[in-house]
Structures are given as C-alpha cells and as structure tokens.
C-alpha cells in the first residue's frame, strides 16, 4: 500500500515538474519574442493564454489528486503577482490598460480545483472555453472599428468579438458535452446554447480582465445546472419558466426600473435560481424587488428625484450574497442555508425600505454617528419613520420563512438579523463610505465627479459596496447566533 502511494506520488511529481517547467519556458519565450518584436505582444498573450488554459483543462485527467495542480496554481499566481508589482513580464500585459487578468486566471483555476475536483468534466469544459473562446473574442474584436463597440460594465466590447465568443463557446460546449455526458444531442444543444450565452455575458460584463475569473466559474455553474436539470428531467419546465422570467425582466427594463446591465445581471441570476430549482428563493427575490420598486415610486414633494434604474452592481449588491449562499447549498447542503438566504435578503429589504420611507420624513435625518442633521438621502442618516421602515422591510422577508417550515423563534432571529444589518449599513455609510467635495462651492457628493476630491471615507467604498457589506452581515449574525444558541 505504501509502495503504491510512493509510486503514484513519484509519477505525479514528474508531471508536476513537467508542467511547471513548461510554463516557465513559455513565459521566457514570450518575453524574448516581446523584446524582439513589440507588435507581437497581443498575439503572445493569446498564445500563452491558450496553452496554459488548455493544459489546465486536462489536469483532472492527469493528476489523481488536486495537490499538485493547487501548487501549480499558487506558483503561477505568485509569479504574476510579483511581475505586476515589479513591472515585469511585460509580454503578458495589455498596452495602456490596467488589467489584472493574469491574476484572475490562476485564482479561478485554484478556486475550481480546490472545491470541485470531483467534477473533472465541468473543469475541462469551463477551462477550455476560457482558453479558446476568450482569445478568439479578443482577436476578432480587434478587427472592428472601436466606435462600433458597446460598454455594459467598464470595458469596451465589440459586437463581432462577443459573437465570436458565443459561437466558439457554444461549439466547444456542444462537442465536449456530447462526448463527456450521455445527454443526447438535443439536450446537449440546448445546454450548449445556455452555456455559450453565459460565457458571452461573463466576458461582456468584465472589467480589467475579470472575465478570466467569471468565465470559468459561471460556465462551471451552468454545466452543473444542466446536469441537475437532466437528472430531474425538468428541461421543459426550466425553459418555459426561464423565458417567462426573462421576458418579465425585459419589460421591467423597458419601464426603466432596470438598466441594461441590471437586466442582464438579473436574468443571469434568475436563470441560475430556476435551473437549480430554487423557486422559494425566486419568490423571496421577486417580493424584494417588487416591494422596493413600489416604494421607490413614492415621492416626497420636497425632493426632486429621478426614476431609479438598478444597475448590475446594485442587483448583485442586494441579491448576490443570497445567490451565492443558494449555490453553495447545492454542493454543500446544510439546514441553515435557507435561514442565511432569508437573512441576507431581509437586510437588503430593510435597508431599501428604510431609505425610501425615510425620504417621507417631515423632519431632517440625523447622522447615526455624529447626531448632526444631514440632507435627506445621505448615507448614514436615520429618521424615526426610516427606522420603522427598516424593521417592516425585514419583517416582510423574514415572515417568508413560513414557506421553509421554519419555527417562529427562527423567523424572529432572521428579522432581527436583517434589521441589525441595516443599522450596520447606516454606520458604515456614515464612517467609511466615500464622499467627495467640490473646492469651488463646497458641495458634497457620494459619487465621484469632475473636479471633486475625496472628502471623507475610502474611495473604494461606495453605496454598492456598503449594500454588499450589509447583505453579508446578516448571515454572519445568524452564524454567530447559531453557534452559541442553536
């Protein structure tokens, strides 16, 4: 037994060394080529991207355990981190763009192989799409005029590049799923359409190379989702409900309650929830969105405000943690997961209700820390009606625990956790959220504007970040409570 383990370890050690030296040699060749011909830099990056990604895609079939692949990922991550910090490995950098794609790449691979090593087919397909489709999209995108591009999140993308991303992702998925799964061609075709579309969306909403992180993770989730749908024999139900929800979201987008990026982000979220049969979760999110949208239309006559259009940042700041917990529950099922999801959405609803109802207050809000009067709508401000609104918002979502067969005492804990998180949201908004000031007229804004300078807080903590912290704090409160009292 010991001899067998030693032999296995020795064989995999040889493979590890081979992989490591191959990567180092590739990087050396890329650097030499870069300094001899700078114009070849873009092609160099794509070749390295393709070769490293393709090699990573087959590691689940080469290594028996994930120890050596994890070490490879850590080494590659360390090399890239040092090169960025010290301005080295210039052949891997994008000219005039502050991209962290070379950092995101090993992080995504490390995440997948650490937690999901037992899903070799999923890893292979997701890494192949990243290795092949992403470079194809980039190379094809360079062939079109910059003015014909679009911008959903932060980086400009071209229509031809996104089309190439979808077609190549679809074909890779169709070929791979037909070979690796016993789904039948029709099911593989439908699954590949969704997988290709999810990869394309992940690439189109990327920022500074974040698609190297989002593409493999999102495609992995969609592959597993269709494995689940196949086992549940629920493909027709999935298609009908998904198309109906996406159509509804599109109508909401046309009515300017969702921006284009918000519509795409919400559609992606809804598709995953429906695919993993989280209909209770979908109900919670729908009630949150409807109630908050209704309240946002209630206007204070003394305040001029425009119709709120939720962006993708706002969609995931409010519902992203609940979605994450729900997806984790699919792989690591635990009875506390529904409680955590409810508490996260309860905190988002409490914060939203507190903000919207607080605008109706007849008295000026006071800063929760300094106790000084501030303008209505300013982060960190509280009013009596706003505080009561927060409690009511948390009660609305917490009471949905009935559909999860939760005990009354657990529902009360969810309500209190959601309400407490909204108070924490106000505290963070008052102390750490960025505020900018105009030197000319001393106007203060929570958004960065031209000629405005950071006045208080931290520039990386905006309202979306504060909301994300809020929706994270409620589940943390639940976990602390469950550790000591449940």
Image (tube, helix red, strand yellow):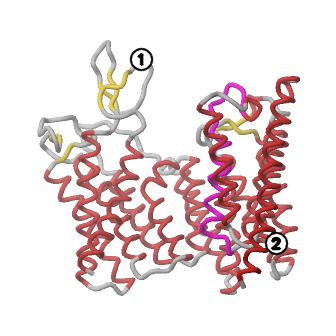
Residue at 21% of width from left, 48% of height from top? 360
**In the displayed structure image, the side of residue 229 where residue 37 appears, left or right:** right
Give the camera-side residue of 457 and 112: 112
Query: Measured along the vertical axis of the image, is residue 220 above or below residue 465?
Result: below
The percent position of residue 432, horizontal first and vertical second, equals: 30, 39
Disc 2 is placed on an element classified as helix
Q: CA distance from mark 2 to mark 1?
A: 53 Å
| Residue that numbered label 2 is attached to | 177
Picture layout, residue 138 above or below residue 476:
above
Q: Quadrant of the C terminus?
A: bottom left
- Where does the magenta region start and end? 93-118
Residue 451 disc label: 1
Q: Secondary structure at mark 1?
A: loop
From the viewer's side, name the closer residue of 119 and 258.
119
Residue 323 in percent (x, y) is at: 50, 65
Task: Give the left or right position of residue 58, taking residue 224 as reference.
Answer: right
Say which quarter of the image contains residue 215.
Answer: bottom right
Q: Residue at x 67, y 70 (%)?
A: 117
């Amino acid at each position: 037994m010991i001899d067998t383990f030693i032999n296995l370890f020795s064989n995999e050690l040889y493979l590890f060394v081979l992989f490591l030296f191959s990567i180092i040699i590739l990087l050396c060749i890329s650097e030499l080529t870069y300094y001899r011909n700078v114009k070849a830099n873009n092609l160099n990056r794509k070749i390295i991207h393709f070769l490293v990604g393709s090699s990573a895609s087959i590691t689940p079939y080469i290594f028996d355990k994930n120890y050596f692949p994890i070490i490879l990922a850590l080494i590659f991550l360390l090399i890239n981190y040092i090169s960025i910090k010290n301005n080295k490995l210039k052949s891997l950098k994008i000219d005039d763009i502050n991209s962290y794609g070379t950092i995101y790449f090993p992080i995504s691979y490390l995440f997948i192989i650490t937690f999901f090593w037992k899903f070799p087919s999923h890893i292979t397909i997701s890494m192949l799409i990243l290795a092949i489709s992403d470079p194809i999209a980039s190379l094809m995108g360079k062939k079109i005029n910059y003015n014909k591009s679009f911008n959903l999140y932060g980086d400009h993308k071209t229509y031809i590049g996104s089309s190439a991303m979808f077609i190549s992702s679809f074909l890779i998925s169709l070929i791979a799923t037909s070979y690796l799964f016993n789904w039948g061609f029709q099911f593989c075709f439908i699954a590949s359409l969704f997988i290709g579309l999810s990869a394309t969306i992940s690439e189109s909403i990327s920022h500074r190379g974040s698609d190297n992180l989002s593409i493999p993770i999102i495609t992995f989730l969609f592959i597993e989702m269709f494995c689940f749908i196949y086992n549940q024999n629920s493909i027709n139900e999935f298609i009908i409900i998904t198309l109906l929800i996406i159509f509804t979201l599109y109508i909401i987008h046309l009515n300017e309650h969702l921006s284009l990026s918000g519509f795409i982000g919400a559609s992606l979220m809804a598709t995953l929830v429906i695919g993993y049969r989280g209909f209770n979760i979908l109900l919670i999110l729908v009630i949150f969105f409807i109630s908050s949208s209704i309240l946002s239309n209630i206007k204070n006559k003394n305040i001029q405000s425009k119709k709120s259009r939720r962006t993708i940042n706002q969609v995931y700041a409010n519902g992203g943690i609940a979605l994450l917990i729900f997806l984790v529950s699919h792989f690591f099922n635990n009875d506390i997961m529904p409680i955590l999801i409810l508490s996260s959405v309860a905190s988002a609803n409490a914060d939203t209700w507190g903000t919207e109802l607080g605008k109706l207050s007849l008295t000026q809000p006071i800063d929760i820390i300094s106790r000084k009067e501030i303008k209505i709508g300013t982060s960190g401000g509280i009013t009596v009606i706003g505080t009561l609104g927060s409690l009511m918002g948390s009660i609305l979502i917490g009471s949905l625990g009935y559909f999860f067969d939760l005990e009354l005492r657990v529902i009360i804990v969810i309500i209190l956790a959601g309400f407490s998180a909204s108070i924490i949201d106000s505290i963070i908004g008052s102390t750490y959220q960025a505020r900018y000031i105009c030197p000319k007229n001393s106007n203060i804004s929570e958004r960065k504007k031209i000629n405005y300078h950071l006045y208080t807080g931290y520039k990386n903590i905006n309202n979306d970040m504060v909301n994300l912290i809020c929706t994270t704090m409620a589940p943390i409160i639940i976990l602390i409570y469950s550790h000591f009292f449940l």
